[in-house]
Image: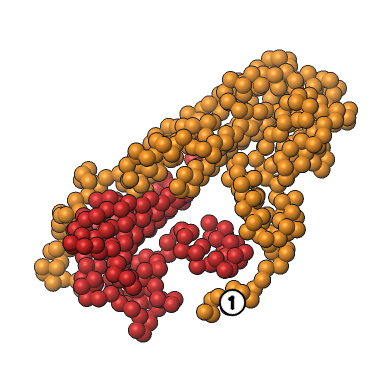
Amino acid sequence: MADGEEREGSELTREQKKEIAKWFLTNAPVGEIQYVAKDVRSVLMDDSAYEAAAGAAFPIYNKTHLVSIEMQDRSGDVIISKYGEVGDDSYLDPRTAQVAIVDHVEQMCTKVRPAADEELPSSYIEEFRSILDAELCKYVGETYPKGTCAVYCTSGKDAEGPGMDFEFTVVISAARRSPQNFWCVYQQRVVSSFYIWILLAGYYLIFNIKFSNGSWRSIWIVEFKDDLQVVEIKGNIQIDAHYFEEGNVQLDTNNECRDSTIFQSPEDSAIAIANIIRHHETEYMTSLEASYLNLPDTTFKDLRRKLPVTRTLFPWHNTLQFSLTREISKELGIGK
Amino acid sequence: AETALSALLSLLPHHADDLLSQVDQPLQVLHDAECGKDFILCEYNRDADSYRSPWSNKYYPPLEDGPLPSDELRTLEVEANDIFSVYCEQYYEGGVSSVYIWEDDSESIIVCFLIKKDGSKTAHGRRGYLQQGAWDAIHVIEVKPEEDGIACYCLTSTVMLSMTTESKSSGSFNLSGSIRRQVLLQLIHLFYIFYTI
């Protein structure tokens, strides 16, 4: 067959295979990169191309998804992000003032060393940072079943005292993996109507966002402006979820917000900032839940109505009531 | 989804047939100039690179000797398309629907109901809530005759959904995916099956 011959002839180069593998790996759904990696490796049938792809893709994936890895000495988790990157494969954990060296492909920490002085902020900055970190740990501990957070000083870390601007980046990352979805038992009893099905899948995803196979990532840039005595806060929240029981549904959402507060003492600033973060994140969750509840009546209707305008189920045995014009045209011999 | 499929196809050319038949892709549509209506493309109305319109029963692009359903099946097909287009109008307010009836080599008959809806415009062409939205539904019924005038109906339904909304208060929201279900029934009357869709 002509088609078959064409395909036989175009053998992919190692470089092309590597690019394809890299694409699959970086686009893997949250928490599933190891499963995707296994499959990609066997489909590629070329270990050196796979290894090159994995070497390039895993760091990108880990940083994008704010993957957290347990440090070797069990002193806590380090979040892999561009904010804490101090070198190739080395990530700072500001809380314990350590740098973890990680193996991206294995998603494991191989070594831990104390952070050098140049990698840490001054004691003036550290005071603000550590108190904010403590407040946020409280918040994250209460709100997220499996969340981690970190506060990095991303600008002005060498400020010795008042009079200088500085900036923190707060990173909150929470993920839930449940490959064995208890949902499948519930699902046996669900009506075969697709409409309800998709809504329920999405409903499960939204209302259990912090508890299902998905991830929450929020990044808050906190700018301390000394001259204006103001703290500006800009946040970005991303939620991803993946449901794959006899189907494949993915959710991804993104939201931006801003706020500000006055520049106060480290303790008061920390409480104010943490409250702002708590307020915006909760508000976002609530508005998502609300818009999801409205989904059937508003947005979803643009795709498919729950019921016809008559508010009764479609009468398959008698469609005459809808096709009057059709019948009349037929009777009068109008049209084709 | 198209990128993933074409990537897999280039990696595994020997599995092309399996991949193409198992992996769902968003539905494509062609315009039937003679009847002034759109129709949906699928394997069951395809021959070589041409597709048969359920409205005019002709192939686009034109094809000599393209296989056509028998007269009986064609009558059933016309009626099914009529009814299904009313269903489509009532629930989807403006989508495209098509029904194809196909006789298999064995004694089975295959009936394929398709719907494609672009959710980014409402029936009147106004912009709705969705920035982007697509609902593609493929329902394939395989009718296998058994003894005593009873037939076994096997319905496989696949729905592919994608929707994106954007708003100042809740940012951007994108939900997409596909689900597939199967139902088996033993019945007499062909049209009874519509209730399970």
Q: Is residue A276 above or below residue A58?
A: above
> What's the colour of chain B in the image?
red
User: Left or right: where does residue B104 sit relative to residue A155?
Assistant: left
Q: Is residue A206 above or below residue A325?
A: above
Q: Which chain is orange?
A: A
**Camera-side residue: A309 or B153?**
B153
Q: Is residue A201 visible?
A: yes
Q: Is residue B1 above or below residue B172?
A: below
**Camera-side residue: A62 or A235?**
A62
Q: Crowdedness of circle 1 by 10 Å Cα count: few (<14), some, many (20+)?
A: few
* Percent of width and height locating residue B167: 49, 40
| Residue located farthest toward the left when viewing the structure as drawn | A331
Q: Which residue corresponds to the image point at 64% horizontal and 50% vertical from the top-left?
A: A38
| Amino acid marked by disc 1 | Glu
Q: Is residue B191 above or below residue A295?
A: below
User: Left or right: where does residue B125 sit relative to residue A69?
Assistant: left
* Percent of width and height locating residue B96: 34, 61
* Percent of width and height locating residue B19: 51, 62
Q: Is residue A322 visible?
A: no
The residue under label 1 is A6
Q: Which residue corresponds to the image point at 47% horizontal and 44% vertical from the top-left?
A: A245
Q: Quadrant of residue B66?
A: bottom left
User: Left or right: where does residue A79 sit relative to residue B116?
Assistant: right
**Camera-side residue: B189 or B118?**
B189
Labels in figure, total: 1
